[in-house]
Image (cartoon, rainbow, N blue to C red):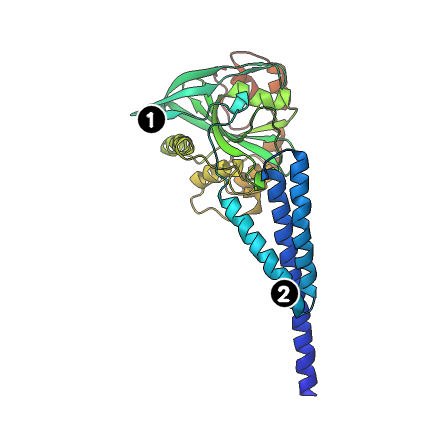
Amino acid sequence: MLNDGKRRLFSVMRAIGRVLLALLCLAMGIWGGFALWFQFPGNVVARVVAVLVWCVPTIWAVRAGFGPKRRWHSLAVFGALFAVMMIWWATIQPRQDRAWADDVAQPLHARIEGDRLVIDNVRNFHWRSKTDYDVRWERREYELSQVRSVDMILSYWMGPAIAHTLVSFGFADGRQLVFSLEIRKEKDESFSALGGFFRRFEAVLVASDERDIVQVRSNVRGEDVYLYRLHGLSSEGMRELLGYYVQEGQQLEQAPRFYNTLTSNCTTVAFELVRRIVPRLPVDYRLLLSGYLAEYVDDVGGLTPGVPYAQLHALGRITQRARQAGDVADFSTRIRQGVPGITQQGHAG
């Protein structure tokens, strides 16, 4: 009886092992298929052929996971091919010399000289549509000692859970400087969240005039934009955060890296932002699902105190104000009207 129990247990464990092995092969096969789709050189036909060819050893390996020992050679072949694929994958490196789209053609080029921040390429486009715009990159200088505020801007482009995070620094003279970590698209290339997992895009840190970077999202792309004033940052903390973005831009200039939809995207900006407010940052899913980031920041005490989050969210919606403001010098002032925690004062556009 005891031997029968052991045999049954062994059979169950072996069946579970086969299922797990088959699922592992399936996962590796799916990953390899997407890797080939997004990175295999050539046109669509070449990529389709490559994926279909890869399906053959994948199917053999999955079947072998359920099969008898004589099929282990299929697993060995699949494992060898996957190892070759990983070697090929390691050869795919980020580059700086592609034919970039106009709005990400110039990565942040900045330096700090004493109290002075010099940025050679602040983006200040004038957008009429996605394809009709005036290209303008400007050299601007700021005094670090004049940083007065930091605002978090969330732009929703795919449902309530996904938002792009931007950080806007306000200076005593009314100017706003916005940083945004974005995909560096090539000309005529569109974003793919799935492709962002498979080294499809490089990352680029853009410094922009606030009117430009808000209106391209609210007016041109039809996104829903919210602005929140951050609290809990000292003057020194604001300057350190600004210095972090300068350093990040310098590192990307020296060593480009890929944009990753999960680990190296605008949530990198969000994490560093919130960590400055709460050094021992509680782990929370909202750091990845940045559409809920503002609620999380409010929970850790980073937004205007004494105001319910529902009110912060409602009054922080700047979409309509941005659309109606147009190309005006006081754009930043107009979009902040009624936003809790902000004392209205002059802002240059």
Residue that carries the numbered disc 1 in the rendered image: 112
Q: Is residue 43 left or right of residue 135?
A: right
**Residue that protrudes farthest toward the top in the picture:** 328
Mark 1, residues whose alpha carbon is within 10 Å: few (<14), some, or many (≥20)?
Answer: some
Task: Name the residue: 61% across, 24% down.
Answer: 188
Q: Is residue 119 left or right of residue 212?
A: left
Q: Which of the 4 quarters of the picture holds residue 7?
A: bottom right
Residue 102 can be seen, yes or no: yes
Mark 2, residues whose alpha carbon is within 10 Å: few (<14), some, or many (≥20)?
Answer: some
Is disc 1 in contact with disc 2, using a CB cutoff of under 8 Å? no
> In the rendering, at what x and y percent does residue 203 appear?
50, 33
Whether residue 292 is situated above or below residue 73 in the rendered picture: above
Say which element carries label 2.
helix
Q: Which of the 4 quarters of the picture holds residue 50?
A: top right
Task: Name the residue: 57% across, 52% down.
Answer: 82
> In the rendering, at what x and y percent does residue 54 appear?
65, 48
Residue type at mark 1 is Ile
> In the rendering, at what x and y percent does residue 167 appear?
49, 30
Residue type at mark 2 is Trp
Residue that carries the numbered disc 2 in the rendered image: 72
Say which element carries label 1.
strand
